Amino acid sequence: MQEIAQILEVDVSQILNFDATQVFNISNNHLVQSNIDSKEVQNHTQVDNYTEKYIKMLETEIERLKALVGEK
């Protein structure tokens, strides 16, 4: 846990006190709530260019963090 905190440059307490509901709060997401009463199911299977770039960026960041952990 300490190594992760060092890599992220945060205190361990910040990791332990992380509230995922602040990031993954679907109860206040108007895109999710607008279809609550609807019987229609929408599947978004197409990935736009921005999403592809964002995924690639996250994959690169994961590899960088793995390398940092591997160095220690």
Image (tube, rainbow, N blue to C red):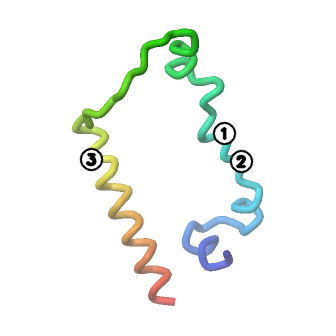
Q: Residue at x 28, y 38 (%)?
A: 50
**How far separated are the C-alphas under marks 2 and 3?**
27 Å
Q: Secondary structure at mark 3?
A: helix
Instruction: Look at the numbered discs 1 and 2 and tell me whether their residues touch, using CB distance below 8 Å.
Output: yes
Instruction: Look at the numbered discs 2 and 3 and tell me whether their residues touch, using CB distance below 8 Å.
Output: no
The first of marks 1 and 3 along the sequence is 1
> Crowding near pointer 1: few (<14 within 10 Å), some, many (20+)?
few
Horizontally, residue 7 falls left or right of residue 56, namely right
Q: Secondary structure at mark 2?
A: loop
Q: Which residue is mark 1?
A: 22
Horizontally, residue 17 falls left or right of residue 1, namely right
Q: Position of residue 36 (x, y in %)?
A: 57, 15
The first of marks 2 and 3 along the sequence is 2
> Crowding near pointer 3: few (<14 within 10 Å), some, many (20+)?
few
Q: Position of residue 54 (x, y in %)?
A: 33, 47
Amino acid on which the number 3 mark rests in the picture? Lys
**How far separated are the C-alphas under marks 1 and 3?**
24 Å
Q: Which residue is mark 2?
A: 19
Q: Residue at x 71, y 67 (%)?
A: 11
Whether residue 18 is situated above or below residue 34 in the rendered picture: below
Horizontally, residue 12 falls left or right of residue 5, namely right
Whether residue 37 is situated above or below residue 41 in the rendered picture: above
Q: Residue at x 57, y 10 (%)?
A: 37
Q: Which residue is mark 3?
A: 53
Amino acid on which the number 2 mark rests in the picture? Asp
